[in-house]
Image: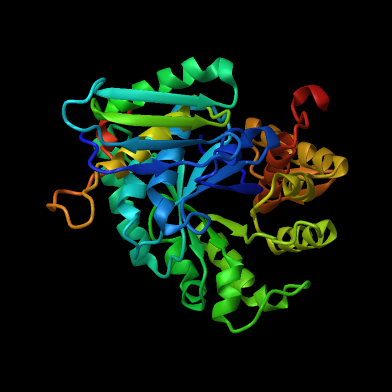
């Protein structure tokens, strides 16, 4: 499926059968089968086959099936792409994307695989992980590189190493990168996905970071453990008051459209298009959180 | 597909299976010997079926194959058998060079 929400993208090491057999039970919006950093060079072939066979035979329900393939400069990328497109991946996430050329080259590989296996051309979406300073500086170029690209993601561990610093509790070292990525994503009309939070014992820290990136405008966060999913999803879950207001805005917009009225008003105030779009997104998030937002609740 | 050298894939971790393939000397019978050791004995036959299906996919008809199962799903058995066979089909060091055994993705369903 093609996700409209990516609040949480859960990484699962591609060569670990226990971790790839039922990630859907934890409720992430996307599962990212990892063929890259979590798999040693000697096991790349086995991981690729394991993810291929799992995707071919297991039912992951409505969760988006994404795969983090190996980088464009590795000997594994072609096999990764061919196998994952044939296996039915919804999205290919490219690590260490540096410039638009990387995504254009990846798209050519994906398209060739789609044609070879009979999938509709354009069905497989792309996401780019930005892991170095050049990538962050090229964020807009990458975000607009191909129509298949649905999002750009920050990968902070490599980024801070390149920047000769390390990760801190307040994330000051990531402000510039996060700001540029979310700005580029919004300008390009694609999603912005934040980096993983690696301290599994620090739930407060994760909550703080999730609130920060939501406020900055990110669409979601990569996570590395199922226990992180409810925390991050909870941050993106609208409050009952937000849902109530959003329902009224969307209803007012629908009524104005039905009456052929150009100006939308609610409680005597004019409602413009960005407010309607924000309200629609609030309702999308509420639905994803399991809330009923239909007519019957008005 | 010919198994040219011993090879292993998978692990003995829970939900996984360790699969070993070995060449069979010419003239030895049976041509294909499959040994299954399962942590859940009652599933050994099912593991054997999954392993044989994977061997058939690659056309492996002469080898000794050992599957040590740790409650793996069928798709994991399949993946580990495929990986072990493809590794075993690569030429041994110093042997006559032949094409590297790439996964035949177009043939795998």
**As drawn, A210 above or below A257:** below
Q: Position of residue A209 (x, y in %)?
A: 76, 62
Q: Specify whether A131 is left or right of B3.
A: right
User: Nearest the camera: A249 or A18?
Assistant: A18
Q: Looking at the rendering, which quadrant does residue B20 occupy?
A: top left
The quadrant in which the C terminus of chain A is found is top right
User: Nearest the camera: A273 or B19?
Assistant: B19
The answer to whether residue A89 is seen in the rendering is: no
Q: Please tell me which residue is depicted at 27% across the width and 43% down the height of the picture.
A: B5
Q: Position of residue A124 (x, y in %)?
A: 40, 42
User: Nearest the camera: A221 or A254?
Assistant: A221
For this orientation, the residue located farthest to the right is A241
> Which coloring applies here?
rainbow
Q: Position of residue B19 (x, y in %)?
A: 42, 36
Number of numbered discs on residues: 0
Q: Looking at the rendering, which quadrant does residue A292 occupy?
A: top right
User: Nearest the camera: B56 or A154?
Assistant: B56
**As drawn, A152 above or below A112:** below
For this orientation, the residue located farthest to the bottom is A164
Q: Specify whether A53 is left or right of A199.
A: left
**As drawn, A142 above or below A222:** below
The answer to whether residue A258 is seen in the rendering is: yes
Q: Specify whether A224 is left or right of A113.
A: right
Q: Please tell me which residue is depicted at 86% across the width and 40% down the height of the picture.
A: A240
Q: Position of residue A74 (x, y in %)?
A: 35, 62
């Amino acid at each position: 499926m093609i996700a409209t929400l990516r609040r949480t993208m859960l990484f699962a090491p591609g060569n670990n059968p226990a971790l790839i057999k039922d990630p859907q039970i934890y409720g992430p919006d996307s599962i990212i089968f990892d063929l890259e950093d979590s798999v040693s060079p000697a096991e790349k072939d086995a991981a690729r086959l394991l993810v291929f066979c799992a995707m071919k035979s297991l039912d992951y329900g409505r969760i988006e099936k994404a795969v983090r393939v190996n980088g464009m400069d590795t000997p594994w990328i072609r096999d990764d792409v061919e196998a994952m497109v044939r296996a039915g991946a919804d999205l290919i996430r490219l690590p260490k994307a540096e410039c638009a050329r990387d995504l254009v080259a990846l798209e050519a590989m994906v398209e060739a695989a789609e044609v070879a296996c009979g999938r509709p051309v354009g069905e497989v979406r792309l996401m780019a992980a930005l892991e170095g300073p050049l990538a962050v500086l090229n964020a807009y170029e990458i975000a607009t590189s191909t129509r298949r690209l649905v999002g750009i993601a920050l990968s902070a561990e490599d980024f801070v190493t390149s920047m000769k610093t390390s990760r801190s509790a307040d994330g000051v070292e990531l402000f510039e990168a996060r700001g540029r990525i979310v700005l580029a994503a919004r300008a390009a009309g694609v999603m912005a996905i934040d980096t993983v939070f690696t301290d599994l014992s620090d739930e407060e820290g994760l909550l703080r970071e999730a609130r920060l990136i939501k406020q900055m405008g990110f669409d979601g966060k990569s996570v590395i453990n199922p226990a992180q999913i409810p925390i991050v999803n909870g941050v993106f879950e609208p409050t009952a008051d937000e849902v109530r207001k959003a329902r009224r805005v969307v209803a007012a917009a629908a009524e104005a459209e039905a009456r052929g009225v150009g100006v939308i008003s609610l409680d005597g105030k004019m409602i413009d298009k960005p407010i309607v779009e924000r309200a629609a997104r609030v309702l999308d998030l509420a639905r994803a959180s399991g809330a009923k937002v239909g007519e019957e609740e008005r | 597909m010919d198994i040219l050298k011993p090879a292993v894939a998978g692990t003995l971790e829970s939900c996984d299976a360790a699969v070993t393939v070995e060449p069979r000397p010419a003239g030895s019978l049976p041509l294909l010997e499959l040994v299954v050791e399962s942590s859940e004995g009652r599933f050994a036959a099912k593991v054997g079926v999954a392993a044989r299906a994977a061997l058939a996919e690659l056309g492996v008809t002469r080898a000794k194959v050992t599957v040590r199962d740790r409650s793996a799903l069928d798709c994991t058995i399949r993946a580990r058998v495929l990986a072990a066979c493809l590794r075993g089909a690569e030429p041994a060091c110093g042997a006559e060079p032949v094409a590297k055994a790439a996964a035949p993705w177009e043939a795998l369903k």
